Image (spheres, helix red, strand yellow):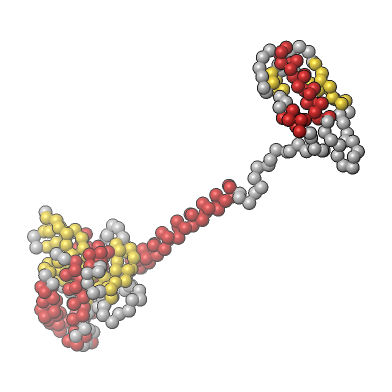
Amino acid sequence: MERRLAAILFADIVGYTRQMQADEAATLARVQACWDRLAIPLVQAHKGRIVKRLGDGLLVEFASAVNAVECAAAWQAAMAAPEWTDGGAGGEPLRFRIGVNVGDIVVDGDDILGDGVNVASRLEGLAEPGGIVVSGSAHDQVDGKIAARFVALGPTELRNVEHPVRVFRMLLPGEGTADLPLRAPADAASAAAVTASRAAPRWRIALPLALAGIIVVLALMLWKPWSDGDAAAPAVVRSGPATAEGADRADRAPVATEPGRTAEGTGDSAKDGGAGKGLVGSTLDSLKKIAPVGDGSSAPTTDCAPNDAGQGAAVQLDCNR
């Protein structure tokens, strides 16, 4: 079975059944005249192949998307002639809806099948009477290559088509750029599908923005840039200025960390213990030399003396207040 890529045009008469019921013979004669004098010559002029007639519809294959869309535009422009707009059976003008799609098709003898044909048929049903609707694949092929303008209708659910299809409405000569509404689908389910598909792009934009806002708020709550930060360790406040000699000696004083060891040395407890007592005594002497504060009155003093707890014990201070 042969496959190929093709541009498919599907045209359908508006109100055909109603006109047939009003005057069957007159309607058949009028439609046949339209095929012979308008549709078939236009298809041939744009190098298309008429695959088959479907009562009030026509299925046409083109090798070029540009030829297919230009044929559709010429078709609808020609239908503005008085012989087609004057009231026929029941006083109703002869009008077409046209859909164009570019897609993969299956060739079965002289017939063509597949999703490419199905999409073109569904697009025709979305067109206004006298209008043209094309798929996104067809629009991509003709954009910038023909003198035509299009209005994007967004991704649209089509009956019996698995994925939404991007849809564009072709503006005919004399029409504005306003996004005119689609013809209402035949049933409520199809109408809901079209409405949902056209609203979907707005949610695709709004949802990422909402998630980004939530992430920013959570980050600020965890970071707390307005807080004072971590509490600093309390500073030692001295009641008066210390002498340079005392400050230097105090900075070099070791701190007892565990029995028998200081921060600046290791060894057995007997050796370190003697050194510890001497250093503590020197530190106390330096602290006693701190100048008095205020108006000359002496600051309260604390009498402390090293207390040797014994061999191998840490140096302690015995303070009497």
Please state, as top left, top right, bottom left or bottom right, where the C terminus lies in the image.
Answer: top right
Q: Quarter-wise, where is residue 61 in the image?
A: bottom left
In the foreground, 287 or 320: 287
In the image, 230 versus 168, the foreground residue is 230
Toward which corner of the image does residue 38 lie, by quadrant? Answer: bottom left
Percent position of residue 276, x then y: 74, 19
| Residue 246 appearing in the image | yes
**Can the viewer see residue 89 in this picture?**
no
- Quarter the N terminus occupies: bottom left
Q: Is residue 314 above or below residue 201?
A: above
Please give the name of the residue rendered at 21% of the width and 78% of the height, measured from the top-left corner. Answer: 76
Q: Quadrant of residue 3?
A: bottom left
Can you name the residue that lies furthest to the front here?
244
* Residue at image coords 80%, 37%: 241
Q: Residue at x 47, y 58 (%)?
A: 209
On screen, residue 140 versus residue 312, left or right, reads left
Viewer-nearest residue: 219 or 296? 296
Relative placement, left or right, of 19 versus 158 is left
Figure disc tally: 0
Q: Residue 213: x, y in percent?
A: 51, 56
Q: Which residue lies at the image location 9% right of the left edge and 63% below the top edge? A: 110
Q: Is residue 33 left or right of residue 135?
A: left
Q: Nearer the viewer, residue 103 or 46?
A: 46
Pinpoint residue 53: horizontal percent, then vertical percent.
Answer: 13, 71
| x then y, percent, for residue 95 | 22, 79
